[in-house]
Image (tube, helix red, strand yellow):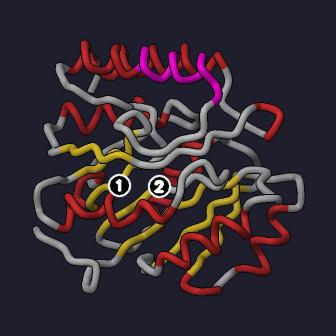
Amino acid sequence: MVYNRYTMKLSVIIPVYNEINNIKTILQRVQEVNLAWEILLVDDGSTDGTRDILKEMEGRNNSRVILHEKNQGKGAAVRTGMQAARGDILLIQDADLEYDPRDYPILLKPIEEGIADVVFGSRFLGGPRRVTMYWHMVANKLLTLITNILYDTILSDMETGYKVFRREVIEGMKIRSNSFNFEPEFTAKILKRNYRIYEVPISFNPRDYSEGKKIKLKDAFEAVWALVKYRFVN
């Protein structure tokens, strides 16, 4: 099916955990792009006051707030958002300001043109980016290399937070990951189902650990295990 941005319904899913300094900004940026039919803010048990802000924002400009009673992990929050989403196209948007909603048009274009079922926004295809976190980049590229070897593909950025897909892609798909290993599990399952995946360059403004970055070294090992497991397990 070919979509256009005037008729398609875009659901933006924003997993949130302790982002009191960023949550208003990211919601404003998403709204300014004026492409989201609905915005799902899934709070994963925040304890820093984020939940109070979210409750104030409930219902503003097509936004819905869903609260987890306790922290379960990014994957769990994304799953909750996917289950609640009512749009034709689903887009995952991190709340930490690393990814810029102004890239939505380029992310949506391959689906609008009917040439893709899934679009990954790649941080390594020449888009503008902040210069920092070398070893984090190395880890991302190693995980992508493992993905390409195991699944015979040519991705440049498996771990990207920008994943956009038609609703039909996740119908009947069981996602089990609760944490950051959502990315490799989702990638593995769409590759095994032979969906058409496109990558497009995006801008990237990574924050470091002093600024609140949450992903850790252990998450890289969990990602490797997920890639191997889902290569051989349905």
Left or right of residue 48, residue 56 in this image: left
Which quarter of the rendered picture does the N terminus lie within? bottom left
Region of the chain picked out in magenta, as a range: 132-143
Disc assigned to residue 164: 1
| Residue 69: % across, % down | 76, 55
Query: Could you say which is closer to the camera, residue 155 or residue 71?
Result: 155
Q: Residues within 10 Å of mark 2 (few under 14, many from 20)?
A: some
| Residue plotted at (29% across, 71% down) | 88
Magenta stretch prevailing secondary structure: helix
Left or right of residue 134, residue 211 in this image: right
Height in image: 173 above or below 8? Answer: above
| Residue plotted at (45% across, 32% down) | 159
| Residue 230: % across, % down | 33, 23
- Residue 22 position by quadrant: bottom right
- Residue 109 position by quadrant: bottom left
Earlier-in-chain disc, 1 versus 2:
2
**Pointer 1 with pointer 2, Cβ within 8 A:** yes
Amino acid bearing label 1:
Val
Q: How many marks?
A: 2
Amino acid bearing label 2:
Ile
Query: Could you say which is closer to the camera, residue 173 or residue 53?
Result: 53
C-alpha distance separating marks 1 and 2: 7 Å
Residue sticking out furthest to the right: 48
Q: Residues within 10 Å of mark 1 (few under 14, many from 20)?
A: many
Q: Which residue is mark 2?
A: 92
Left or right of residue 28, residue 111 in this image: left
The magenta stretch spans residue 89: no
Query: Could you say which is closer to the camera, residue 171 or residue 163?
Result: 163
Disc 1, SS: strand
| Residue 193: % across, % down | 17, 38
